Image (cartoon, coloured by chain):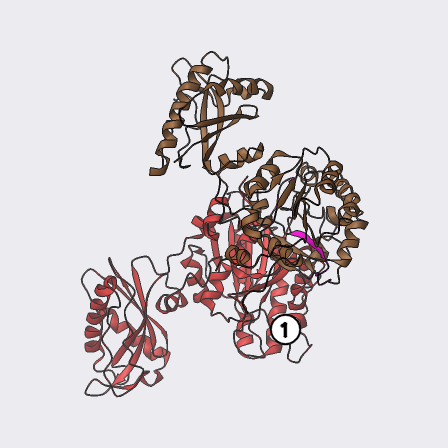
Chain colours: A brown, B red
Amino acid sequence: MDLHELIISLAEKNNNKIIMLVSDGIGGLPLTPGGKTELETAETPNLDALAKIGVQGLSTPILPGITPGSGPGHLGLFGYDPLRFIIGRGALEAAGIGFACGPKDVALRCNFCTVDADGKIADRRAGRIPTEESAEVVKLLRAVKIPGIEIFVEPVKEHRFVVVFRGDGLGGNVADTDPQITGVLPLDPVAQDEESKKTAEIAKEFFSQAKKILANQPKANCLTMRGFAKRPTLPSYEELYGLKAAAIAVYPMYKGLASLVGMEVVGKPATLQEEVDLLEKIYSDYDFFFLHFKYTDSRGEDGDFDAKVKMIEELDKVMPRIAALKPACLVVTGDHSTPAKMASHSFHPVPTLIVSDLARTDATNAYGESQASLGGLGHFEAKYIMPLAMAHAGRLGKFGA
Amino acid sequence: MDLHELIISLAEKNNNKIIMLVSDGIGGLPLTPGGKTELETAETPNLDALAKIGVQGLSTPILPGITPGSGPGHLGLFGYDPLRFIIGRGALEAAGIGFACGPKDVALRCNFCTVDADGKIADRRAGRIPTEESAEVVKLLRAVKIPGIEIFVEPVKEHRFVVVFRGDGLGGNVADTDPQITGVLPLDPVAQDEESKKTAEIAKEFFSQAKKILANQPKANCLTMRGFAKRPTLPSYEELYGLKAAAIAVYPMYKGLASLVGMEVVGKPATLQEEVDLLEKIYSDYDFFFLHFKYTDSRGEDGDFDAKVKMIEELDKVMPRIAALKPACLVVTGDHSTPAKMASHSFHPVPTLIVSDLARTDATNAYGESQASLGGLGHFEAKYIMPLAMAHAGRLGKFGA
């Protein structure tokens, strides 16, 4: 019996609510050995008060030493083993612009490129055509029609855009058409298995029509296709946990990831304050709330220690409003660490705090890496956060008699 | 996706170096409840200084409660799940005398025995014939010739020696010929699968020729064969981690184990000082250095608490020379514990210290079991030490986008 079968067999429905607050990249590093991390440096009286009445530990996003991207990082938080459930590049790119792929969809990442008179690639990125310009060209491609197939063409950034084919019998295993070099023709989209032959045919037809449409463009007069992927087959939050789940996020990537596991993406908040407003507003309508705070990661990626500290302090200020909702279980965590010292995602484990009437409170009295390392939850893989949250919310029954 | 596939897909090549110092059997036990272990008793100012700027934890060699031999213990340290990659007894015995089995080799452990006039075993160990005497008889067996097969016969100790058959199509699954009792004939070497039929035929022929050669020996006038084994199929350090790895060890067993994973066994150091001399000398030529210190285990096996303490203090004295090389990641660990109190290997987890610019320093300030138990690396399986070392050396990329 695997973890999901176990959870499905034990999940119980009741009115106990769970809030999972994900402060992206919250874990950090001290700038000098023995110093304090961003989180330990920040003034966080509210988080610390919660740490006193809750239980914390360190969660490892994937496995020791492994640095996750946002996709695998969030899958782990949502309770899906990120080494078992892989999100293909196309599906992740679609998620990144908030496009929720369905079961009949194949998503691919496309690049505009510039080809010469012979059709050979002269510039693989169409001169990094500006986003506004590119978005207009993308719209032209919506004129492509293929019988029996619904086609979505969505801009991303600069020369990049997403195409989704929706139809029956479409496999996701087609080779990239980007030859990775200039001076040659784009490659044919070749099916890598029997199930993907129809997809390859459709991609070929799409390319053929698109080339005609783009023929007179000064820069973006052709395209390459990469990362063909179906969305991973993930049991939904409803199927897995029996939870009606809402996602509250500012950025499209996190809305997309949440929708992949069947959460309902609610509203269009633009700030943390608006996210919490929304949480309060919809609180009676759902069982589970994924609240995503982006800027701890952003400032970490910038390599700006002090700015990340400030973002953590911003987060701390809204904690009383969140706690006041009195969920049966409140989880405060992150999808990975983003130490300002490294200006990137990292492999370091993430301080994870659970506040619940069922928490076995530990001796820690501040939310932070050093304290979490000594906390009552110990060190554990992030895929266990959801079972722990369900249990602390009194939503998991007994295994065996 | 399993751990090795993951590591292979993420490993990056750069100039960041890793030193793994393995103090064999370093973990211990207090002689009385609440007392100090050997490591905690030893004066180790240099290791303690490293613990202050590094991060430590307790690594479990195999699984909780499982005591490893040297083979599985080191495989775990090298990042190979010791429950998945099994080194057969013959291949381990060969490694133990520093004989590196190749892919065409089948290794077996042989015992000299004494048989009576009817060929029945009278003494299964040939009167524990002394090593010097036995080594001379072993040489005689090099006269055995089998067409198409290269044969190696190497002494081990007393009545024990190793035979390696090298050739095409040799399976490793042949039953032991030692009947385990006296008064009966040695058994025939019987193939246990189709692939090992040729090996069984060769073993039979070897036995037949060997018996004639030994006929006039006073004690060692016959032999039994046990533990037929091919070397395990292990991806090399180069394949797995992209590391050019050097092994520095005094004892043949550890050289043999290192060579099984594709490390280059360098030099012939006879003391710890010479090992460190060698490390300094070859430091610019490799990415990874496995440095093995044997005597913490030896004195533990002797049951001599004070002598083990002294060995740890010897080790501490060379730490400044090792640290002065400033590797991107220095790991100090052991393959298992060898408490003097037990005078044997044990199952107790091993204090493991990582010193790196990317280490999230913890509150511990001395290298030892009690402190490691509270350290920032937590408690983890030894197979994760290599991923952690790679990550702390900045040699692992991000998983997913």
Type of secondary structure dominating the magenta stretch: loop
Q: Nearer the viewer, residue A32 or B57?
A: B57
Using the rendered image of the protein, determine whether residue A369 is visible from the camera's viewpoint.
Answer: yes
Q: Nearer the viewer, residue A145 or B305?
A: A145
Residue B153, image x, y percentages: 29, 69
In the displayed structure, does residue B216 sit left or right of residue A121?
left
Residue drawn 49% across and 39% down? A231
Using the rendered image of the protein, determine whether residue B324 is visible from the camera's viewpoint.
Answer: no
Asked if B133 appears above or below B104 in the picture, the reply is: below
The quarter of the picture where the C terminus of chain A appears is bottom right
Q: Amino acid at mark 1?
A: Glu
Asked if A271 appears above or below B218 in the picture, the reply is: above
Q: Nearer the viewer, residue A396 or B289?
A: A396
In the displayed structure, does residue A271 sit left or right of residue B315?
right
Residue at image mark 1: B38
Query: Residues in magenta?
Result: A343-361
Q: Nearer the viewer, residue B238 or A385?
A: A385
Residue A144, image x, y percentages: 45, 20
Element at badge 1?
Answer: helix
